[in-house]
């Protein structure tokens, strides 16, 4: 049977495109246009393209839908996760070694100086801060989303509260040296311990309210990057998250201010210099972190926060405890009661 040839004035539109009418008077004339972002067509001369399901994305030729890539800081195929893990383990090991040295030299003046109990609390909180990095790695779930910010806020507040207690001890000790000073009755271990307890308890209260009102949870971000599903933690209540950061910043600012005021005291109070520098590092890291945190998405936003945790914790550890360890290991002749630099 004889077939009439189909009239056309252009080639057929291949899969991955659709027909677009032209201004020509001939119906056989049309243009071809690639499917829009997120759409596919799997037939020749398709009149329209159709959208992929929410968790799928067109392939390179816009012919079929394929699963989107799930993005998070994965242990399996992400170098950042490996670097952060190794760094956290390294700093945790260093903290444990310092803690071991302080236990071995428990009765020496360098350990007793400026309240050894607070020093042990500070070392323990720094160790926990390094270890809480692992809550930020791997695929987020509801429980890790809740634990990561709360644990980070509590451990850091405990650390900064300990630094604040050390700073207040220095201030009180200096004031007490003046004749007839009423500050002599405040030179007790209890003052520092109470200060650490009260300041860290306020942060615990903020975290409890945050978790009670609107706790963090896992969410899928499907719109920020084409072809990717970002698995991330939604903070739930932004006010709660920024209250935790704000309170921690307040403690750091107070400690920095007090330490800066007494940084030029005689050598007997020279820990104030180290506290000043440690708080300067701490505040600088977190001030720089906030705009970087707000301007990133996905795993890089988490990476910024992890970097801030590691850098600020390492700053506190290095500035406050490395000088003491140097005396213990390399200058033991200074770690005696006769030394004027380190009295109880």
Image: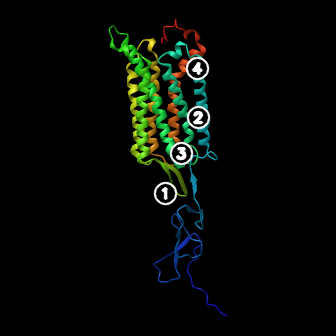
Q: Secondary structure at mark 2?
A: helix
Which residue is farthest right? 1
Q: Is residue 214 above or below residue 58?
A: above
Disc 1: which residue: 223
Q: Which of pointers 3 and 2 indicates the residue nearer the eye?
A: 3
Mark 1–mark 4 Cα distance, whole angstroms, equals: 53 Å
Q: Hey, which quadrant is residue 3 in on the image? A: bottom right
Can residue 332 be seen here? The reply is: yes
Disc 4: which residue: 103
Q: Secondary structure at mark 3?
A: helix
* Spot occupied by residue 242 in the image (x, y as percentages of width and height): 40, 41
Callout 1 crowding tier (Cα within 10 Å): few <14, some 14–19, many ≥20: few
**Which of the marked residues, 3 or 4, is nearer the chain's N terminus?**
4
Disc 3: which residue: 144
Mark 3–mark 1 Cα distance, whole angstroms, equals: 23 Å
Q: Is residue 83 above or below residue 217?
A: above
* Spot occupied by residue 26 in the image (x, y as percentages of width and height): 50, 83
Q: Which of pointers 3 and 1 indicates the residue nearer the eye?
A: 3
């Amino acid at each position: 049977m004889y077939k009439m040839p189909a009239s056309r004035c252009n080639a057929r539109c291949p899969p991955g495109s659709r027909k677009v009418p032209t201004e020509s008077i001939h119906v056989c004339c049309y243009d071809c246009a690639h499917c829009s972002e997120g759409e596919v067509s799997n037939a020749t001369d398709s009149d329209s393209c159709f959208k992929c399901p929410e968790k799928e994305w067109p392939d390179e030729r816009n012919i079929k839908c394929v699963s989107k890539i799930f993005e998070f800081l994965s242990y399996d195929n992400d170098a950042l996760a490996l670097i952060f893990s190794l760094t956290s383990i390294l700093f945790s090991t260093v903290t444990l070694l310092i803690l071991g040295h302080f236990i071995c030299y428990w009765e020496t003046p360098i350990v007793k100086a400026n309240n050894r109990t607070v020093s042990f609390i500070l070392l323990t909180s720094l160790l926990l801060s390094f270890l809480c990095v692992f809550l930020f790695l791997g695929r987020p779930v509801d429980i890790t989303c809740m634990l990561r910010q709360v644990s980070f806020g509590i451990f850091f507040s405990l650390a900064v509260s300990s630094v604040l207690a050390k700073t207040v001890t220095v201030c009180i000790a200096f004031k007490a040296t003046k004749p007839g000073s009423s500050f002599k009755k405040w030179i007790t271990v209890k003052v520092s311990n109470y200060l650490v307890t009260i300041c860290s308890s306020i942060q615990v209260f903020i975290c409890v309210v945050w978790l009670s009102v609107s706790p963090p949870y896992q969410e899928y971000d499907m719109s920020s990057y084409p072809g990717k599903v970002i698995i991330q933690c939604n903070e739930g209540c932004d006010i709660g998250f920024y209250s935790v950061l704000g309170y921690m910043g307040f403690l750091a600012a107070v400690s920095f201010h007090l330490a800066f005021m007494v940084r030029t005291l005689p050598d007997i109070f020279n820990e104030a210099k180290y506290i000043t520098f440690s708080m300067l590092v701490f505040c600088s890291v977190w001030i720089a972190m906030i705009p970087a945190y707000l301007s990133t998405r996905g795993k890089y936003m988490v990476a910024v926060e992890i970097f801030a945790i590691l850098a600020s914790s390492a700053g506190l550890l290095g500035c406050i405890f490395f000088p003491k360890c140097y005396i213990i290991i390399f200058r033991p002749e200074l770690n005696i009661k006769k030394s004027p630099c380190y009295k109880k």
